Structure formats: structure tokens, C-alpha cells
Image: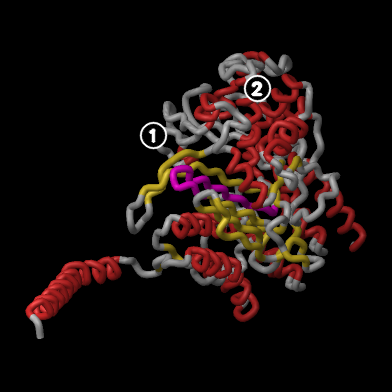
Amino acid sequence: MERRDKVTVFQQMTTRRIAISVLVLAGCLFGPYAKAQEKQLPRGYREVGEDKVAALRELCRATADTGLFSGSVLVADQGQVIYQEAFGLANREWNIPNTTDTKFRLASVSKQFCTMVVMQLVEEGKVKLDDKITDHLAYYRKDTGDKITIHHLMAHQSGIKDFTANFEFRGRISRLPADKDEFIKEHCSGELQHEPGTIYSYCNAGYCILGRIIEKVTRKTFERNVQERIFEPVGMKNSGYDRNRYVLEKRAGGYTRGPFEYSNADYMDMDSSPGAAGSLYSTVEDMFLWDRALYTYQLLDEKHRKLMFTPNRDVPEVKAAGGRRQSRYGYGWQIYTRTHPVTKRRTEMINHGGAINGFRAMENRLVKDDAFVIVLCNQGDSPGRSEVWQSVVNLSAELIHVVTGQPFRMPGKTRITQEQRMYEMVKTAGVEVAIDWFKTKGKKAAWGGANQALAKQLIKDGRIDDGIRLMEFDVEQTPGKVWLLRKTAQTCLSNGRPEKALALAQKGLQLRPDDEGFQTVNEEAQQELKKQN
């Protein structure tokens, strides 16, 4: 072998030895670190891996399998849609599945479109942020209307009491069509809960007022303004204002998920009560177009767009909103930083959720990551429950983790509900055993009536006395809830128990002599007892 060949072989062997040494050293240094990192991943978390789409698909399908989600999902990364899929049924009676172009009610996600129109009017010089309500609605009460500005309304700092807190909202107010000005006079003009501009307190009433101001200034309906100013320019052909009388192709039906069955969501007149606060519908595909438009100056100049996405931190939040020392609400959007519970990665969020009869929505814009996550759902929770809402919130959070490459969690198994547990107790051991269990281990409802769904199911099954006994127990637990007393009296009357109905009605009349419900039950129960005698 020539000397040159020997040198070459020696060099190759030396290079090999160095490479092996480097690999060994790397293994010694980084191997334990990688294993330590893997060990540090809490139970239930998993890495995204190289295939984000596969992780997104697995997460969404597992969530749908829990029965707590029915709807559509879209995820975009770096400005491109990487995943979209639909789950569950758009119409349960006809067994029609949801699709990615199914139209869902946006509920409070609608507010961002309202603020966009307002800010366009500000840019055009037709409205000022410090304009008062009374500058545009002459009929509004002056003592409060002279203090509340457009800024206060958009930032939820008006101090106006939200009409959705009225007990009669769900059963009466939300169902009745009303003239917008009359609705504002009756339901959006009460005594202030706090001075305007001093605290953040979420208020749908403020957005109903904003919608009417838009109409007064432009002399066009809120519907036309949103259509002409946003939907048409952006190309959102499957979005609009959800008037009940409209026949909409591919509109999803809204459903309430109870502990025993699904039911059609309660009717709501969309034009009068939610109005500009929550009456729009859209698809996940259209909402992606909206997200992309917000990166441009197509709809609004930089100055006013920046105002929309700047949190108004000069005021604290009410306890119900989290009680933080600084509000994180801009104009129609929440703006905050989300910290991953494991990696501690901080992600800047612009988001908004929405909940209305039969529908839930959650939208997330990750501007610095150029990512977008939208979840639209055509299920809602029965009063006092939040499993569906929590499922949508959790799904959205985990989708954010996946799209940003962070460890994520799959949904847990659906647990048996309190009502289902007690239902089996009633059937096997009797209603009093179930009541005794509730007294020690049951979860009470803040709104009262924790056992109403169970009572309804028992009555439906023909176990009328068991159902009524549970309703009476709810009355005993929360004697101050007059609606429970009234409902129990009405149930007794309609199920052939006039004596109990009469006793409950008379008790109710002692509390509220002018209550028409108690008066009706009282009269009809007496008439029924006379027939029996």
C-alpha cells in the first residue's frame, strides 16, 4: 500500500472515531434530557408528532364520540386550512349530517361584526367613540344615556343590566317579537349597576343599543349594513342575519342535550332580543375568510383596527367575568395571552365565544402564529348544566395546542350524570332513597331545580307521584324560587293531582297575590275538585 493510501485510510478511521465519539457524547448529554422531558409530560398528555392533521382528526373524532359535540371544525396554520371536518347531525328528525358548509348560529361571536360596522362609521366620521347614547337615540332616558358612550357599549363598560339575567327572558322575553325601540326602552334602559367606564361587565343590552344606533346613523337595517359592509366584500356567501322566517339552505337545527334525551332548542325571536348582540349565522369556511380579511386593510384602516384589538385594561372585571384587575376585552373581542399548562409557551389570543339556545361557538385567532381555530356546535346545555359548553371550550383549547405543536389531551370518558344515577335509584330502591342520597352527595343547582329533568323523565315514564315528589323536594330545598313552586303546581294540575295543585297555588298566592299563573291553577284546581265531588 502506498503512503498516500495509508494516510487516506488513517484519516477516514480518525474521522469515523470522532463521529462516533460525538454521537456517544450527544447520547450521553441529550438522551437523558429527552427521556427526562418525556417523563415530565403529565399523565393524559401526548405529543403532537410530525402529523398535525392526524392529531387534529383524532382529537375531534374522540370529542364527537363523547356525544357532547355536534358541529363543524376548521383549523388553519400559516394562512392555510390544514383541517376541516363535520360531526353529528344538522337535523336529528331527518338524520341529516352536518357538513363544513352547514350554517350555524354564531350567538355572541356576532358582536365582532357589530363592532366592525361601528368602527367603520367612526372611520367615516359618522360616529365618535365618545358619542353618548342620547346623541343617537333621542327617546333613551337622559340621566343614564347622557353618561354612556359608544366606547362603553362596545367595551362592556356601560353599567346597564343585561336582560338575559331576567328570569323571564328564557320563557317569555326571548320568544316575543318586539319593536326594537320599544325593546330597548323596556329591557335595556334600567337603573345602572355601576357607573359607566368603571368596570367590565358583559352586557348583551349594550350591543342591542349599538345595533339600533347603526340603523339610525345609516338609515339601513343592521342586517343590510353587515351584508354590504362585511359579508359581500369578504365573499362570505353563506353568512347572514338569522331572521326566523327565512328559509336557509343547509341551516343546522339547534338541540338541547339533556341527561335522558335530546330535544329541540327553545324558540327565540332572533331579531328583537339578541339582535346585533347575537343574531348572525355563518359556516366554518366563511369564518376563515373573515379571519383572513382581518389581516388586511380591506374593511378598516390600521388605526381603527388596532383599537378593536386593544384590550381596555383601564378598568377591572366583575367577579362573574373572572374578577381580574384589568379587563381584557377590546371591541367585540377578548385579547389575552394563553400559557400552556405543561410547556409554559405563551400564545397571544384574540377570541370570542358564543352560546344561544341550541348552539355553542368558539373562535380563536392566533395572530402571531398566523393560525385560526373555529368550532361551531348545534347543541346546547339544558338550564343549569354546562357539559356541552365545556366540551366546546376544551376542544378549542386542545386544537390550539395541536396547531402550535404543544402537548395536548384527549377528551375523558363521559361520566354518568347525577340524574341518571338517581333515576336508577328511584327504579330499584324508591324515590325517598334517591332523595336521601341527594341530601348527602347530590350537587345542587345555583338556579334551583336540580331535579327537574329527572322529575320530567319519571313523569314521562308514568311514575307521576315519584316525579312530583322530586319537584316538591326541589321546592323545599329552595323555597325562595317562586317559579319552582308555580311549575310544581301546574305539573300537579296537569297530571291529575288537583288537591296538591290547589295547596301549592294557594301557597304561591300568599307570596304573590297578583301572579296569573297561581291564579289560573287555583281556579282550575277548585273546578276539578268540584267535578270529582
Comparing labels 2 and 1, the label whose residue is closer to the camera: 2
Apparent side of residue 106 relative to residue 403 in the rendered image (left or right): right
Extreme-left residue of the structure = 3
| Sequence-wise first label, 2 or 1 | 2
Tell me which amino acid carries mark 2: Leu
Please give the range of residues in magenta.
358-371
Determine crowd level at label 2: few under 14, some 14-19, many 20+ residues with C-alpha closer than 10 A.
Answer: some
Tell me which amino acid carries mark 1: Arg
Q: Point out residue 56 in the picture as x, y percentages from the top left corner.
A: 52, 64
Residue 342 position by quadrant: bottom left
**Secondary structure state at the residue bearing disc 1:** loop
Determine crowd level at label 1: few under 14, some 14-19, many 20+ residues with C-alpha closer than 10 A.
Answer: few
Q: Point out residue 446 in the picture as x, y percentages from the top left corner.
A: 55, 51
Report which residue position mark 1 lands on.
Answer: 325
Residue at 66% across / 15% down in the picture?
Answer: 134
Q: Point out residue 377 in the picture as x, y percentages from the top left corner.
A: 65, 56
Q: CA distance from mark 2 to mark 1?
A: 31 Å
Q: Are marks 2 and 1 in contact (CB under 8 Å)?
A: no
Front residue of 179/462: it is 179
Residue 293 position by quadrant: top right
**Secondary structure state at the residue bearing disc 2:** helix
Q: Is residue 264 above or below residue 433?
A: above
Report which residue position mark 2 lands on.
Answer: 121
Front residue of 326/336: it is 336
**Residue 52 lies in the magenta stretch:** no
Q: Point out residue 29 in the picture as x, y percentages from the top left corner.
A: 17, 68
Q: Is residue 510 visible?
A: no
